Image: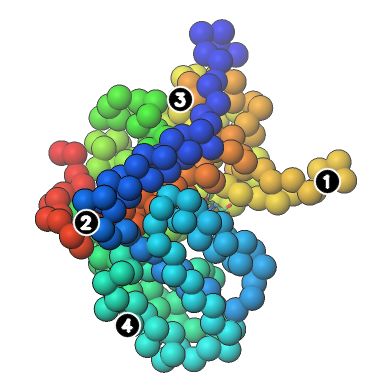
Amino acid sequence: MDSLYRATRIDGKVFAAGLVERIADEVAQIRAKTGKIPGLAVVLVGDDPASAIYVNSKQRETLAAGMESFSFRLPATVRQSDLMTLLERLNNDRRVNGILVQLPLPAHLDTRAVINAIDPDKDVDGFHVINAGRLFTGQSSLIPCTPLGCLMLLKDRIDDLTGMKAVVIGKSNIVGKPMAQLLMAENCTVTVAHIKTRNIAELCRTADIVVVAAGSPGLVRGEWIKTGAYVIDVGINRVEREGRSRIVGDVAFEECGHAAAITPVPGGVGPMTIACLLENTLTAWRWQNEPRPLTNDND
Ligand code: NAD
């Protein structure tokens, strides 16, 4: 290991807490100035326990930031048309600035149609095809929370990402693809790797930034990481180790001491996701109440 580098652990919990504090301050200022507060509506369909936990923590954090939280719990058997009617109502409700439908939805519902029924300017998950298109074309958009959080963590460490070589492992619509777009907008040279990519290790070894969102525990080994590179581990994997159930990432964290900085799992990217949901709700409020900026792109 190069003794010049001892990887810094990027503490996503601390960063996210600071971000939520800043958001809460801004919400308080909006309230003082306008008498209004940004509102987030969360829709949960069915009774999946993991989804219920996510939704509860999203609501708790929304309230903690001083925002209004609207909660809708629908039975797993809900008809698509009834869900669409609810979304239409929320789209037209001026107290609701952000709308989130917790995924996954039961199989009988058309997830793509549901997401695209949300007003794009209230789509705080950034999954609507219009927001994906805006991001792709460098227009200001609501950006999926997890990649937005990853970018914030990187920009906290790196003043200017221009010209850096980035490898993103994973090409899902919610993490990999938007992550690649965000890094490109920062003028990185981006390679996207996925399950069918050959020689991922070699690609990674040349990268200044590696973002891993594969859902494959310990996929990225220390020897894949260049000395002084930045490593962002998005993976959340439940594994059994020494008779205990543990959450681990996609990167062999303990092998990456020669990186410049690395996110742990848990405590890295995870806490940023909810903080960025609140950030997006605030952004949505601004765009519904003030002129919106034209571009995300840094060209
Ligand atoms: P996904 O299953 O939709 O996509 C996974 C991607 O990784 C695919 O493009 C696939 O080709 C690629 N991949 C899988 N195994 C691979 C391998 N062995 N080598 C190379 N590429 C491989 O998953 P997702 O929704 O993008 O999530 C990815 C991971 O991130 C999961 O572990 C998920 O739990 C986690 N996640 C975390 C957060 C968070 O808040 N921290 C949010 C979303 C997702």
Where in the figure is residue 208, as x and y percent of width and height?
40, 28
Seen from the viewer's position, the closer of residues 275 and 266 is 275
What is the quadrant of the C terminus in the image?
Answer: top left
Measured along the vertical axis of the image, is residue 146 above or below residue 201?
Answer: below
Mark 3 and mark 2: span between their CA atoms? 45 Å
Mark 3 or mark 1, whichever is nearer to me: 1
Q: Which residue is mark 3?
A: 229
Mark 4 or mark 2, whichever is nearer to me: 2
Measured along the vertical axis of the image, is residue 59 above or below residue 246?
Answer: below
Amino acid on which disc 4 is placed? Glu
Seen from the viewer's position, the closer of residues 23 and 186 is 23
Q: Which residue is mark 4?
A: 88
Mark 1 and mark 4: span between their CA atoms? 45 Å
Q: Which residue is mark 1?
A: 244
Mark 2 or mark 1, whichever is nearer to me: 2
User: Picture quarter containing residue 264?
Assistant: top right
- Could you tell which of marks 1 and 4 lies nearer the N-terminus? 4
Q: Disc 1 beta carbon < 8 A from ligand 1? A: no
User: Picture quarter containing residue 189?
Assistant: top left
Q: Disc 3 beta carbon < 8 A from ligand 1? A: no
